[in-house]
Amino acid sequence: MTILGGMEESSRILMDVSCIVIKRTVNQYRGQVFRNLLACGFKKIISVETFNPAFNTESLSNDFPEVKFVRAHGRMNDGELVNLGMGEVDSPYALVLHDDLCVQNFKFSRTLVQKLVECRIFCVAARLLNTDRQGIPVRFTPKVKSMVFDVESSLAVVDKALTLYPFDLAGFYDVNTFRLLGGFDYTIEAPYWQEMDLFFRAWLWGEKIQLSSAFTLEFFDELPVSDRTANISYLQFYLKNLLPNFRRDHGEISLASFPSFKMRSHCGLNEAFRLFCRARDWVKLNRFRFKRDAVSLLENWNLEEGA
């Protein structure tokens, strides 16, 4: 990666919170994005993007010397860009969002930060509005339908309601917890399953994600669309999160579960066994981080919401 700017400290720091902003808008709105963010008083603003000669990053780094621009070389999806941004954070909390959520009507105050910090959880997900200022589904509940893992979405946003993951990654994160969880798994290529992997892992390892009705962000452009195709990335997610069982004080994947995985994977024997063994080794390495398994999480989701 290449880092530009960020050499000057902001003259208006109002909170011990960093902002990681992922580029998605066209160039003409980027100046407005950074003016809005600087007005909030973040300790540090980190703009992350994949390298593109058409981006106006060099000129922006001169116009906004307080902003650190991180340009990734090579193909990376948003989860990996967030990993890079988190590596530059030196505050206990970070706001993560795409830049099309802070073009207009963007506010993020010290009063709101205090409310979000008081939640004392891994991630507080934002309530999101579309371009017509209408609420969109941001509450996600894990389900099993016909023996297949599924996720239901809902428009209903009750303060402190639980959600499996934050839509579009938009949320207020505990930075140390993010690092302890290992961040996003770069070996999972499909963005949706890479993101699902981190947040499902967080739940299995005893963390929580919830919504805040006071934390509202507004899209400036069309809503992003997630590709949920059950490809090899889904298999990686399945192996790391749905297949492990919780035994007494640890998680594990039994060798006896390989035949059933092979049948549902539609992979050749060698590829299926390679994926299975890699996931089994990973679970063994992290076995004592598990606090429950997927079956327990799904069966007790309603109890979690009442806790």
Image (cartoon, rainbow, N blue to C red):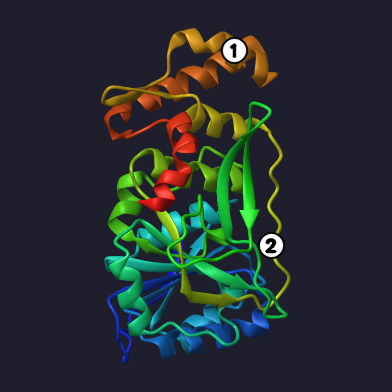
User: Which label belongs to residue 290?
Assistant: none
Q: Is residue 185 visible?
A: no
User: Residue 162's x, y, as percent?
Assistant: 46, 55
Mark closer to the observer (2, 1): 1
Q: Residue at x 55, y 66 (%)?
A: 157
Residue position for label 2: 224
Q: Nearer the viewer, residue 53 or 13?
A: 13
Q: Vertically, is 236 above or below 110?
A: above
User: Which label belongs to residue 260?
Assistant: 1
User: Residue 92's x, y, as percent?
Assistant: 27, 65
Question: Whole-Å distance between the Cαs marked 2 and 1?
Answer: 35 Å
Q: Residue at x 31, y 92 (%)?
A: 11
Q: Is 299 left, or right, of 219 in this rendering?
A: left
User: Residue 20's x, y, as percent?
Assistant: 44, 68
N-term-proximal mark, 2 vs 1: 2
> In the structure shown, which secondary structural element does the residue marked by tag 2 occupy?
loop
User: Residue 95's x, y, as percent?
Assistant: 42, 69
Q: Vertically, is 32 above or below 17?
A: below
Q: Is 48 left, or right, of 145 in this rendering?
A: left
Query: Callout 1, which amino acid?
Result: Ser
> In the structure shown, which secondary structural element does the residue marked by tag 1 occupy?
helix
Query: Callout 2, which amino acid?
Result: Pro
Q: Is residue 23 visible?
A: yes
Q: Quadrant of residue 104?
A: bottom right
Q: Nearer the viewer, residue 229 or 152?
A: 152
Question: Dot 1, crowdedness within 10 Å: few (<14), some or many (≥20)?
Answer: few
Q: Quadrant of residue 218?
A: bottom right
Question: Dot 2, crowdedness within 10 Å: few (<14), some or many (≥20)?
Answer: few
